[in-house]
Amino acid sequence: MNDKLSEFSTIRCQHFPLCSGCLFQEHVHEPPAQKMLADFFKTIDPNLFIPLHYKEIVGWRTRAKLAVRGEMKCPQIGLFHFGTHDVVDIPDCPLHHRAINHALGVLKDTMVKAGIEPYVEEKKMGLLRYVQLAVERKSNRVQLVLVLNSETSNDKIAHFVKQLYMLGVWHSIWLNFQPRISNTIFGEKWLLCEGEEYLWENLAGISCCFHPACFCQAHLSLFDEMLQHINNFALKGKRVVEFYGGVGIIGLTLLKNSASLVCIEVNPFAKQCFEKTVGKMDKSLQEKVSFKAGLSENFLEFCDGAEVVVVDPPRKGLSRELREKLKSSTSLQQIIYISCGFAGFKRDSVDLIEAGWEVKHAAGYLLFPGSDHIEILCVFEKSG
């Protein structure tokens, strides 16, 4: 390996190996999962080449959810130590966008001055449980979510938020209320305290809208490249249905070259983001889209008549009901599958192939450098 590639593939972090954020520090562009992925596809087609796409390995993370623990005078904000709920404080994570590291310093200082108590998990006491930070790349401002061990706000919290926002770092500051004893980070109740309601990002030439409760990839530069690849492989002029659609980014990037788009997503905040994004698009495109709020299993009838289906399921993969519907569809010509869980993807792929689908293209994306995780893009088309 030449010096330039060695430098590019090495992460130097003072928190390794305590922090659970990374498994590797060297040769991060060659994770073991790459061989597992290649070996699986060889069982399908020995001649199928599976490229691994990657970009920056440091400074790429534009979105982070971090636990808040420690003491009032010395809060700790970071990730859990491997196998525990002890927080490893990571004030200068090399993977984080520089705006996140700066914002964490500002947040800690203000917490100490305002007397904000970190959450104490053993006693189920304290105020601030988690934070989410998301960077608006065009301004380097940060959308901040404070996850509180409380059902409501109060004067102390309101004063703390005002102090924070005056420092000029923030795109917006939200409160999320999570008083339940649960491993679920967010509660159901959200409150915008300061700043703009939505964060906007340009992806594949589209201005996309995000509420803090909605999923967004953290490695946006590589995700943008993936979107361009999807657009290259998608059949043109077809009726598209996107299941597990989130705020609809993938489907909307295909819209210009598609006959129509239906986006299906269960997150209750996704529809408003989808509609805001579509509202900035050309009128001729707006007339071709619709959004259905709910579980994918509740809208299986949209497979009938669809020619291209896009799926981006959770780690467990496709639901049995959707998988069976895809196998039985007579109109469907192409399935674009984006996977974040190899086991579920492997099961679904074998099932689809046995039902007469062929892999036309597959690639891996190192969206989390330092981990042994590869996101998969696979394009299936009907055999014959």
Image: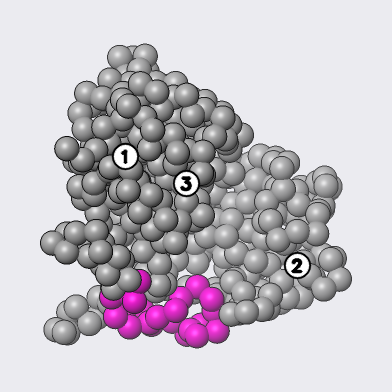
Q: How far apart are marks 2 and 1 (CA)?
A: 46 Å
Q: Where is residue 39 in the image (x, y as percent from the top left)?
A: 27, 69
209 shown above or below 343: above
173 shown above or below 344: above
Residue hosting label 2 = 118
Q: Is residue 261 left or right of residue 117?
A: left
Q: Which residues are drawn in magenta?
A: 10-34
Q: Position of residue 312 (x, y in %)?
A: 42, 45
Label 1 residue SS: strand
- Nearer to the camera, 98 or 217: 217
Residue hosting label 1 = 335
Count of numbered tags: 3
Q: Which residue: 79% across, 70% down?
A: 121
346 shown above or below 234: below
Residue hosting label 3 = 318
First in sequence: mark 2 vs mark 1? 2
